[in-house]
């Protein structure tokens, strides 16, 4: 679990804390939780390191908006072996129902890298809960089972 932020700490990262709590509540162990700055190289370094470890899924929060420092999708997308476009599409649709047209500003995405499922979601608690409750947690077991087949 990686939070992409220039300003958060583990203590102030409520979105990342929510991801961790929700995963553990559903019986999914969190093997790593860290914060990296909004810098593509640092995001890619963290992702590569985690892909080489024991993680079966990696969730990155933050850096998905349209501000100049929001670069998480650009850092992650080139590393994906397969993109799962339905994730971003559904996330934005569900967000629209919740927050209206501001949902179009989200650039959440998902895919697979070397047998590991990767999710990129906004860092706000509301967006985290929406993504986790409606999309990630219901499909995490199935996605990790499918992804592991290509490892």
Image (cartoon, helix red, strand yellow):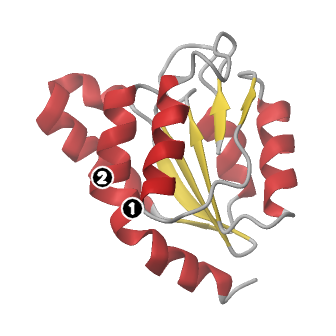
Looking at the image, the residue that sits furthest to the top is 7
Quadrant housing residue 95: top left
Q: Which residue is mark 1?
A: 137
Residue in view at x 46 percent, y 32 percent: 122
On screen, residue 150 versus residue 122, left or right, reads: right
Inter-mark Cα distance, 1 to 2: 6 Å
Is the Cβ of the residue at disc 1 closer than 8 Å to that at disc 2? yes
Q: Is residue 86 visible?
A: no
Residue 110 percent location from the top left of the image:
52, 56
Residue 83 percent location from the top left of the image:
55, 63
Is the residue 142 above or below the residue 95 in the image?
below
Q: Is residue 96 visible?
A: yes
Q: Which residue is mark 2?
A: 133
Residue in view at x 61 percent, y 79 percent: 147
Residue 2 percent location from the top left of the image:
67, 39
On screen, residue 93 versus residue 148, left or right, reads: left
Quarter containing the C terminus: bottom right
Quarter containing the N terminus: top right
Is the residue 57 above or below the residue 42 in the image?
below
Look at the numbered disc 1 and give the secondary structure of its residue.
Answer: helix
Towards the viewer: 117 or 75: 117
């Amino acid at each position: 679990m990686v939070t992409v932020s220039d300003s958060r700490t583990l203590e102030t990262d409520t979105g990342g804390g929510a991801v961790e709590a929700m995963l553990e509540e559903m019986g999914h162990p969190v093997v790593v939780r860290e914060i990296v700055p909004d810098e593509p190289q640092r995001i890619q370094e963290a992702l590569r390191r985690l892909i080489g470890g024991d993680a079966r899924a990696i969730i990155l929060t933050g850096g998905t908006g349209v501000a100049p420092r929001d670069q998480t999708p650009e850092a992650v997308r080139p590393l994906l072996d397969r993109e799962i476009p339905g994730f971003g599409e559904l996330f934005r649709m569900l967000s629209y129902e919740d927050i209206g047209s501001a949902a179009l500003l989200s650039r959440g995405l998902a895919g697979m890298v070397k047998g590991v499922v990767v999710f990129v979601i906004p860092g706000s608690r509301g967006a985290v809960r929406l993504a986790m409750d409606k999309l990630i947690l219901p499909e995490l077991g199935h996605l990790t089972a499918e992804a592991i087949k290509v490892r």
